[in-house]
Image (cartoon, rainbow, N blue to C red):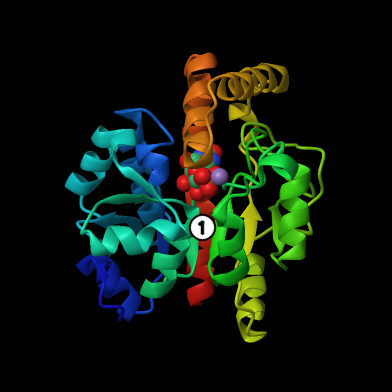
Amino acid sequence: MNQHLDISPEVKAALEAGKPVVALESTIISHGMPYPKNVETALLVEQTIRSNGATPATIAVIGGRLKAGLSREEIEYLGKTGRGVAKASRRDLPALVARKADGATTVATTMIIAHMAGIKIFATGGIGGVHRGAEVTMDISADLEELAQTPVMVVCAGAKSILDLGLTLEYLETKGVPVIGYGTEELPAFYTRQSGFGVDYRVDSPAELAAMFRAQRELAYKGGMLVTNPIPEEYAMDKQVIDAAIEQALQEAKAQGIHGKETTPFLLAKVVELTGGDSLESNIKLVLNNAKVAAQTAKALCE
Ligand code: PSU
Ligand code: MN
């Protein structure tokens, strides 16, 4: 086991017994949602994974230790500190480890740490991707490169249209990352079930997801797989409302000169502010829905 990694006793016992485990990220807690909804949601997601027969492993960096499985106190701390905790993507782990610092893990770093711990499935809300205007800014999330090189299945609700979804799909195709639609032929756009872009394959059961992931491992690919699970119809947002909020958030980010790692957290917070919390409720529901599919798939993978 990696010398910088700590696996919680519960997660360790599950892994050793060959039982299903699902990884969860922590940037969604610190930077993705406001306190106290972020902590409530993180705990509810863990509970959802348990009630679907798997063990949750929320991932973060605490005091320079890579943690797979957090205590309730650690989740509280990340949620309360919010954007005061460093957002940690791939390039940040060496500095955090050397300095014994804290970090909230993005999709990229959660995949890295999950893989180190031997966890194969990871549930979240949305992934980072190719930003609108990336042909000039080159702002492309490290999440995409991680999907190309780390063998973990990521279950999400697609990506927010703060990104260029078409370019994001092109990038994933170039990198050889399969994009699966769970019960859909269309890439979901996080708050809405449709984006206008097709996925590579439609899959309708956890058993079939597990079979595809198993085949990818048997082919000895180094990368992972992206499962996109649409938000349940009853919680989906009105496309016009959410599109208008996203447009305004993008304009404000531009006017304020927001760039680099600040871009995604700024846009996420702005969208919540502009939609008066409606988008936050949708966000919570879709994460719970992803947790359920991930837990069921982790179970199928153990059979
Ligand atoms: N998109 C969301 N919610 C999130 C994030 C993205 O809808 O919480 C977070 C995730 O942790 C993701 C990260 O990995 O932002 C991507 O940041 P960047 O674009 O800077 O790579
Ligand atoms: Mn970026």
Q: Residue at x 40, y 37 (%)?
A: 31
Q: For numbered disc 1, what is the local secondary structure? A: helix
Q: Residue at x 35, y 39 (%)?
A: 30
- Image quadrant of residue 75? top left
| In this picture, residue 21 sits left or right of residue 85 | right
- Residue 76 sits above or below residue 144 on the image: above
| Residue in front for this viewpoint, 65 or 259 | 259
Tell me, yes or no, if residue 216 can be seen here. yes
| Residue in front for this viewpoint, 269 or 9 | 269
| In this picture, residue 168 sits left or right of residue 276 | right
Tell me, yes or no, if residue 66 can be seen here. no
- Residue 109 sits above or below residue 129 on the image: below
Please provide percent x and percent y for residue 64.
Answer: 23, 60
| Residue in front for this viewpoint, 274 or 192 | 274
Q: Residue at x 38, y 79 (%)?
A: 18
Question: Which quarter holds ligand 2?
Answer: top right
Crowding at mark 1 (Cα within 10 Å: few <14, some 14-19, many 20+): many
- Residue 200 sits above or below residue 83 on the image: below
Please provide percent x and percent y for residue 140.
Answer: 63, 49
Please provide percent x and percent y for residue 27.
Answer: 40, 45
Please provide percent x and percent y for residue 2.
Answer: 31, 78
The residue beneath circle 1 is: 294
| In this picture, residue 284 sits left or right of residue 95 | right
Q: Quadrant of the N terminus?
A: bottom left
| Residue in front for this viewpoint, 199 or 46 | 199
- At label 1, the amino acid type is Ala
| In this picture, residue 160 sits left or right of residue 175 | left
